[in-house]
Amino acid sequence: MTPDRPRAAAQTLSADDIARLLPHRHPFFLLDRVTALNPGVSAEAVKNVTASDAVLAGHFPGRMLYPGVLLVECVAQLAAVIYGSAGALRATGEVVGDVADRVGYLAEIRQAKFLRPVYPGDQVVLRAESGPRLGGLISVTGQASVGRDPVMTVRLAVTEREDT
């Protein structure tokens, strides 16, 4: 960003807004809030991990750890928010719209590094940035942090369905 350009106001989305962009529902609706959004480019979100998350009952009994694969899915869902909001913006002029039917699939996990466990009580900050497209695939880089500590980095490819 250059000093002479004003910074755009950060877009934030509530859980209800996110639900309009994603087809996921409980118990697989993982993002609690989007705290910053640049449609089509990048986003930041939070996931609050609580002891009442059903998955923690079996992962692991006696020592609850939030599964790393769900952290990867959080980044994939955040990627869907990034390109879903861009699609809604193109279609309606608003960043939130009923575009969940355009969400594609997680196509590839290229690199995932888990740097430390995530426990109940942690607030995970997720970041994702859209990269180059190759046909129907979108490259995404992401990371998850708790406080100042990175807990995961990942490179993904996701799909986006064409306008229907």
Image (cartoon, rainbow, N blue to C red):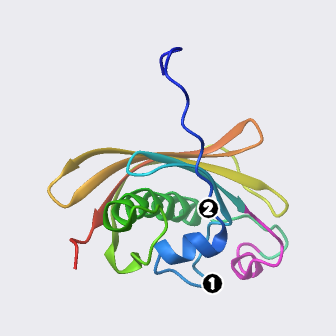
> Which label sits on residue 27?
1
Q: Name the front one of labels 1 and 2.
A: 2
The stretch drawn in magenta includes residue 50 = yes
Q: Residue beneath label 2, please?
A: 13
Residue closer to the observer: 155 or 4: 4
Dominant SS in magenta:
loop
Q: What residue type is labelled 2?
A: Leu
Residue 60's x, y, as percent?
74, 72
- Residue found at x 65% / y 71%: 15
Disc 1 element: loop
Quadrant (top left/top right/bottom left/bottom right) for the C terminus: bottom left
The segment highlighted magenta reads 48-60
Label 1: few (<14), some (14–19) or many (≥20) C-alpha neighbours in 10 Å: few
- Residue found at x 61% / y 70%: 30
- Earlier residue among tags 1 and 2: 2
Residue 65's x, y, as percent?
74, 64
* The furthest residue to the left: 135
Decide: is 60 above or below 72: below
Give the CA separation, mark 1 to mark 2. Answer: 19 Å
